[in-house]
Image: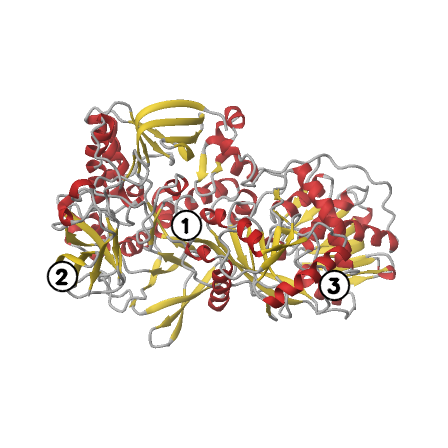
Amino acid sequence: MTVTLTTAGPLHPDGGAEGTYDVTVVGAGVVGAAVARELARHRLRTALIDAADDIGDGTSKANTAILHTGFDAVPGSLEARLVREGRDLLAAYATETGIPVERVGALLVAWDEDQLAALPGLRDKAARNGYHASRIIDAEELRAREPHLGPGALGALDVPDESIICPWTTPLAFATQAVRGGVHLHLNCRVLDITTDADTHTLTTSRGPLRTRFLVNAAGLHADEVDRLLGHDVFTVTPRRGQLVVFDKLARPLVSHILLPVPGPAGKGVLVAPTVFGNVLLGPTAEELDDKTATGSTADGIRFLREKGRRIVPALLDEEVTAVYAGLRAATGQEDYRIQEYPGLRYVAVGGIRSTGLTASMAIGRHVMELLTAVGLDPGEPHDLPPLTMPGLGEAFTRPYRDAALIAGDPAYGTLVCHCEQVSLGEIRDALASTIPPHSPDGLRRRTRARGGRCQGFYCGAAVRALFEEERP
Amino acid sequence: MTGKAREVDVLIVGAGPAGLAAGAELAAAGAGRVEILEREQEAGGIPRHCHHGGFGGRVDRSAYAWASATGSTYARRGTTGPSYARRSVAAAAAAGAALRTGVTATGWAGPRTLETTGPAGLERITARAVILATGARERPRGARLIPGTRPPGVYTTGELQQAVHLYGQRIGTRAVVVGDEPVSHAAAATLHAAGVHLVAVVTDRTAPALRLRNPRVPLLTGATVTELMGRTRLSGVALRHDDGRTTTLRCDTVVLTGDFVPDHELARRGGILLDPGTRGPAYDAAHRTSLPGVFAVGNLLHAVEHAGYAAQEGRAVAVPVLHRLAGTEEPAGGGRRIVVDAPLRWIAPNVTGPDGTRPQGDRFVLRTERRLPRPLLVVSQDGRELHRQRLRAAAVPGRPFHLPADWADRVDRDGTAVRITAR
């Protein structure tokens, strides 16, 4: 296994014809990584590049971490199809690789008569999306299943297959498999300009020129800018900020399902959901912005979420808050994905991938592969990638600190460094030595949970930083 | 989980000042096998990284000595935190307590059975008496709901002290300290030791509880942090003053100090009743929790008192634990809850003792939300006044004050909760 991961210096594809990649994927978020993994199954020289110092560092790292059934998608849309296909692909992939997933189910809670009256329509819409397991439950059953729900809930639509998933392990698994499969991952590599001739795109990047025959634009929030570099003016990405509040693990018994509002004219609304790490999530807000870097939380946002949360699960508000964060979704003003192939340009644009992108990622990967073929790429026969096992971060599964056999084999798994999240020295050591190691303490947190718990580093912050700097000064 | 099952007489969780003192006292009293678990690699607790004087002095008021930066006279007494920690560890070991570091209690397998993880594997330890001494931590930025971006450079005092004193890490160049408690001044001293320029100390209180020794450091009162700014590194802290003015302080480091919260996870996972005010286990003067045979001591009960106070509680728990081991414990269930009305925040202990047992030092500890000049404290139960007393000094947020326990034997065991009001 030859792994190529660079973070600085010029970009040289080894052994390429005049240093040219066959395919370059711009953007190493969950979608770009899924596309790269798909490309890794073929004998192609592929590059995956990202402006950040880590994979999944944009929209992918800060979302609601739900593996959707797609029950509420717009029937007949590309999104509906890719979410439907993607959920099965990703669920199977998660089982295979150890990405934490819990099928907790969702309840769309009706808080007034109008919302109650909307439930049958939502159930029928789910059916039109190929999802037939949803059913309407009454207030009594709802109360029995969610005893901590605030007063006044009249009933709910039960969507038993809606699941929660680890948003960090998923793109990391894709990228790890891609890189082990021969894809070159170049980080800190921002695209500044693109010139195109008869058979090559030349990308001017912050790390020098990169030549590629085919190009996939999976640049997320910046997909419109990359698209414009190719002379298009098709869509504009408007960042839609979602602020989220993460509650302490001690709040986890308060919530059993993903509690969704009944969607109204104002959008999908605020949900309360468990996380695979054993916390409870409250959010997101939906704020249309024009600044693609505005990932800060605001006092108004936090106040708004707490008001909403107090209505949904009042007892939640008495629990300690572990973290507040904000993510930006790539809204394009069209309620569907904007995936478009350009035969003359040997180019596929993957834009407007919104919050369902995590669920749909593998299906988007396959779809883009077909489009690349349609624009002239000859990928050859696919081969299987070597199997992959990801570190288990899910609270519902046996974590290393509870694994007697693992500790007996290596006492480092019994040596806890981060106490709140019970992260062992062995896991931190493994992450620092992994195929795609972290380049910041935050990257280490997304790989291990270290210093992501209730104390946020009061106990372990200095120790974790010392381990990180020892390995990556 | 599988693991070796063992039995001990007394199992203590946490080898800070309270746990070590309890272990030393019980081992010396012949309580049998007394084992202290510490999840850190080194025992001693928070004092390990408090490199300032005042620990274990004659007046034993290390909370005030934490404020060595203030030039308090107390700071000249006693010893430093690390030296105090070493002394406490040595005393527990010399008394015969078994100290096991790097071992974490991860949960409960029974009423007095704890599951543990350590490099040597998993265990299930059953004790005749369990003492929880898991301490307290400062609330981090998220729990304080401070908005803004999430750049590096944001610390609590605990993390800062470890980074500087235990690991010698780089901090930054310009820092703002948020908070106005003794620990805030310890944070300022640590920043000074690390060569960091202190831009300002910020507090939302209108009158400072303690004065800074260095008069050149601005103390901004009546100011709330409204936003943290910066992307790859903290670049500033936005403030709103009480009069509506807003300011941005340019800095690359911010230390969020004080606002301690008990580390009650193990207690809650064991189903122990908590006190809504302290957020630690509800407990009586004999340090008994709602779970028979499970006791609690130290800052888990009432974040946060100084090391000497926590150690006193550790020593005090020995008597009720010995009664428990001997089968002569007072029956549970006689205690009434003690509740406080605003602006009081909490009282400890918060359950009346068995048979009118009085808390250590014959007094209850209280905290207030806002400053009360010479408060009148009234103790009542079911509308019946048990006690009324005007304190001689002001009660100040962030500092303990005390209520004598003269009234404890007048509590009606068949009545409802005892209520404390202040005005």
3 or 1: mark nearer the eye = 3
Instruction: Using the image, determine if residue A473 lies above or below residue A272.
Output: above
Asked if badges 2 and 1 are on one and the same chain, I answer yes
Tell me which residue sits at (81%, 44%) in the image.
Answer: A44
Q: Which residue is nearer to you in this view: B389 or A196?
A: B389
Residue type pointed to by label 1: Arg
On the picture, is A14 further left or further right than A346?
left
Name the residue rendered at 13%, 59% in the picture. B388
Q: Residues within 10 Å of mark 3 (few under 14, many from 20)?
A: some
Tell me the quadrant of the picture where the N terminus of chain A can be found.
top right
In this picture, is A391 found above or below B69?
above
Marks 2 and 1, the one that precedes in the sequence:
1
**Considering only vertical position in the picture, is B4 above or below A351?**
above
Quadrant housing residue A189: bottom right
Which residue is label 3 attached to?
A336
Relative side of B148 to A236, left or right: left
| Cα separation between marks 2 and 3 | 67 Å
Q: Is residue A384 visible?
A: yes
Residue B297 placed where, x, y %? 27, 40
**Number of numbered discs overlaid on the protein picture:** 3
Q: In the image, what residue type sits under mark 2?
A: Ala
Residue B109 place in picture, x, y as percent: 43, 31
Q: What scheme was used to colour the molecule?
A: secondary structure
Element type at mark 3: loop
Dot 2, how many residues are within 10 Å of its Cα: few (below 14), some (14-19), or many (20+)? few
Q: Quadrant of residue A416?
A: top left
Q: Nearer the viewer, residue B248 or A246?
A: A246
Res B357 seen here: no
Report the residue marked by disc 1. Answer: B170
**Residue A453: x and y, percent?**
46, 47
